[in-house]
Amino acid sequence: MTSEMIDPTVEASTAAPGPETTRVATRRLSKWTLYSRRYARNRGAVAGLIIFALLVLFAIIGPLIARYDHVELDFLALSTGPTAEHWFGTNNAGNDLFAQVAVGLQRSLMIAVSVSVGVTIVSALVGTAAAYFGGWTERITLLVIHFMMVIPSFLILAMISNKSGGDWRVIALIMIFVIGWYFPARVIWTLALSLREREYVSAARYMGVRGFRIVLRHLLPNIGSLLVINFTLGVVNAVVAETGLSFLGFGVKIPDVSLGALIGAGSSSLITSPWLFYFPAAALTLLTVSMALVADGLRDALDPTSAAGGRA
Amino acid sequence: MSNVLSVRDLAVSFASEAGRVDAVRGVSFDLEAGRTLGIVGESGSGKSVTSLAIMGLLDENAKVTGSIMYEGKELLGMTDKQLSVIRGNGMSMVFQDPLTSLTPVFTIGDQLIEALTVHRSLSKKDAWNRSVELLKLVGITEPERRMKSFPHEFSGGMRQRVVIAIAMANDPKLIICDEPTTALDVTIQAQILDLIEKAQQETGAAVIMITHDMGVVARTADDVMVMYAGKPVEQAPVHELFHKTRMPYSIGLLGAIPRVDKAEKEPLTPIKGNPPLLINLPDACPFADRCPIVMDACRTREPELLPVATGSGDLHRAACIRAHEIEDGGLLGGIPVYPVREVPESPLAKLPREERPITLEVKNLTKTFPLLKGAFLKRKVGEVHAIKGVSFDVREGETMAIVGESGSGKTTTLLQIMDMVKQTDGDIVIAGTSVNDIHSHKVERQLRRDIQIVFQDPMGALDPRMTVADIISEPLFAIGTPKEEAHRRVDELMDLVGLNPAHSDRFPQAFSGGQRQRIGIARALSTNPKIVVLDEPVSALDVSIQAGVINLLDELKAKLGLSYLFVAHDLSVVRHIADRVAVMYLGDFVEHGDVDDVFENPQHPYTKALLSAIPVPDPDIERTRQRVVFDAETMSTRAVTA
């Protein structure tokens, strides 16, 4: 009776595509297999991931295979272009640029990725939780956010960073908690406000799912594409902010180098020794472009309504 | 009489990523002045695109071919400027959503005057006078004062009246109504349909009434065109179509609607499957996959719309190669085209109601909203009573329905129960536990196991980021079921609601509306609840799909011994599914009792008016019965005078 009493044709519908799957319970695909499969379909995204992986490899292995240390000075080769000895050339003090770019990339990656991860997590949690729980939680959170918006945060960042002697970990922490999180948190809050009213959120509440679990399971994934974009832009922003700091002399200090510091130094001698600018700038461009491609692919893979979703 | 509009072989296609979408594939009809053509069909059948093509309102990416002759002039190929002279003047349109078809920043008067002066040169004073006259005609009280009101000061029904006033402003020859009453309550719907009739008499215009509601067609149309997959599949005068139906799709549509005027609870006949995608349609009958009497010949070429002899002499056309075999009453050789389904019998039904255990009891439920005043420090100046002391009980294996129009408080009642709001002077008892005794989240979660909800919107209630398996198992994880058991249960539940368990790793987008609602039902059933709250579970679905879901609910109730608390505005559905019914009006039950008692012998004037407002899908009954309207001032009914 079971099979007869229920509309037997719903499986044969046009909206549920795919070959005539037998009713034998097949092993269910996990969500992550599904996401990675969909990601892999996007060629640009895969290319972006490869570029990013190569950059990371370069940042880790580069300093090991470089013939010179990044602080070592070669007085026999001052301001030379790329040679067999110095692959990326040297600056006017005789530093090997290959070693400097590798180390600088490493430092920039560490700052940018940790800042962006931190900002994304903090802003997403604060924004969605404020929207979901409402009431006093929401009011106090918004009060803090609006207060943060009016204080001159870049100035504070510059002051504290200078005091800490250019320690990148201090810079990263300040970039997360003083200048990074509140703006995205407010954007996420407004988006989550509309999600709060969705029926699936009430449905979960009526099932007895705990509040914080609803935030994690229903609100966060549904702003996933925004978070991914925020993360990518965050990486780019962090690199830019760190460049600005280094340019002003408040960022990482010699002997430590970062891409920002290298670009800042290289831009002043663009006519006489252009390689000093082009190599770190190329590394920065590759980093940001690869992040954009990765973000694009992630968004399509996570978003069930995107074009890639039709073939899932 | 001459034809106002004559459409020949109208075809509309759109370019899309997936290929060319043939939204309309050959529509032809003639329309005389003063007559009404009803176009019925489900969503995606091409009925709205047809009307937009006639009005010349389609986007530029639409390719329109064929011929549309309006008063002897060919409309296709006219520029937008040339069409503007005709649009709103000779042809006018009433849209579905009265909330968005008026501009919020202009007064009603400005918009009416604009509609008048754009086509003829009237003095300011004449335009004003004519506008006031029009408002009076559509039944708006104090028209002079209302001319200066903004749309937000009007209710939905009043806005639709204004839209109709604008539509008839220039004495049009043709009025196209695209689902004019879908967004409105039934009593308002009845008034608007009366008004459209009045507008037609006043202007002598031809009317195209586009709707998915067979009742509305039975009431208003002279001729009916049933559309399916972009093509008319049956075209006949209204009496012919309802009594001598020849096309299996139309028979299915008529069989799928529950009737408010019939007591017997035989299962509805759902049409299996879903409409085809309109991309690369093969040369076959598009209905073949869903048709119960399909033959091999149906799949070799698409049948044309050909006349069938029904013995009445009227022109009756159907696109079915077996149309001549079908007899009146949807019979084929004495056997119904759609096989009759067995009524599931619940063992509980034999038990008298009084002996069955109570699963949900509500005593003196009250909800008030405070009225606040003051910009900064809000102080309470009064209260709005949303629910005024409602009491009822639901017993095992029983469906209790709450019906009412928007604003009656039925959804608020439901939310009070689902939110388990503690009552000061009353009580809500769910499966033996009073909500007043809930003192910890643990007790609350335990209680949630016994009461689950199915929402109205099958899309909005399912998290688009979760796979179906995750959605269905969510309540199980919330009560701490082990993973293995939850996964087994998901397969079991999907089978129970008629879905293929192999599809459980898909996202909700991959399913059609009816299937999504089945997922919602499976989720509600996962914890083996005692009572399921259904918040308008079928009102967002097409009729043929709706019938399948209603049957499923009936069967599950009989099989699992569930109780339903069903909230709906559609009295036909309620009549079909409910055992007991309560009619809610202004936050209170005005009538409460056995469903047949209430429907056969309504006591309260509001119930009488509500029942009389629902159009019955039978033109003979619909056009002869006396309708009554409710007068809120005197709390009594009076007969409608046409």
Image (cartoon, coloured by chain):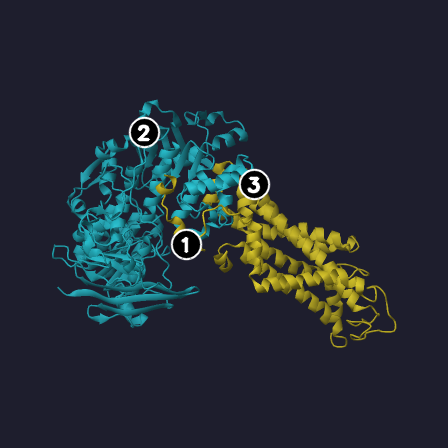
**Nearer to the camera, B1 or B400:** B400
Q: Earlier in the sequence, mark 3 or mark 1?
A: 1
Instruction: Tell me the amino acid under the disc marked 2.
Output: Ala
Marks 3/2: CA distance?
Answer: 41 Å
| Colour seen for chain A | yellow
List the residue tagged with mark 3.
A213
Q: Chain of mark 2?
A: B
List the residue tagged with mark 2.
B349
- Could you tell me residue A259's position as x and y percent? 73, 63
Which disc number belongs to residue A15? 1
Q: Chain of mark 1?
A: A
Between disc 3 and disc 2, the foreground one is: 2
Kindly tell me whether residue A136 is visible in this rendering.
Answer: no
Do the dots labelled 3 and 2 sit on one chain?
A: no
Q: Residues within 10 Å of mark 2 (few under 14, many from 20)?
A: some
Instruction: Tell me the amino acid under the disc marked 1.
Output: Ala
**Nearer to the camera, A7 or B2:** A7
- Could you tell me residue B499's position as x and y percent? 42, 46
Q: Residues within 10 Å of mark 1 (few under 14, many from 20)?
A: some
